Amino acid sequence: MRLQDKLMDAYEEAYEEAYEEAYDEATDATISYITRYNELVAQGLNSQEIMEQLVAQFGEEHRPALEKIVLALN
């Protein structure tokens, strides 16, 4: 096997591992978001209050994902 082929194999393997890790983290985060959303709904909060609570808990950088979840589950 040529060096170039070995390098490509190593690159592909590293890419696949990184993708799987990122996917698992995103899935775990989504489950956490939805679980917390359901808890807040059970408390009787409205959508705006839920968003405020979610952003306070998970951080402003997660707002776009949280907004999508709140819209989807409303």
Image: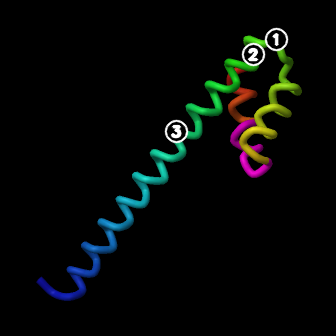
For the residue labelled by badge 3, is the local secondary structure a helix, a strand or a loop?
helix
Q: Residue furthest left?
A: 1
Query: Is there CB contact under 8 Å for labels 1 and 3?
Result: no
Q: Is residue 61 magenta?
A: yes
Q: Residues within 10 Å of mark 2 (few under 14, many from 20)?
A: some
**Mark number displayed over residue 28:** 3
Q: Residues within 10 Å of mark 3 (few under 14, many from 20)?
A: few
**Mark number displayed over residue 41:** 2
Q: Is residue 40 magenta?
A: no
Asked if residue 63 is positioned above or below residue 41 in the image, the reply reads below
For marks 3 and 2, give the CA distance. 20 Å
Give, as a single range, the part of the protein colored magenta.
60-66
Asked if residue 67 is positioned above or below residue 10 in the image, the reply reads above
**Mark number displayed over residue 44:** 1
Asked if residue 6 is positioned above or below residue 74 in the image, the reply reads below
Q: Which secondary structure dominates the residues rendered in magenta? A: helix
For the residue labelled by badge 2, is the local secondary structure a helix, a strand or a loop?
helix
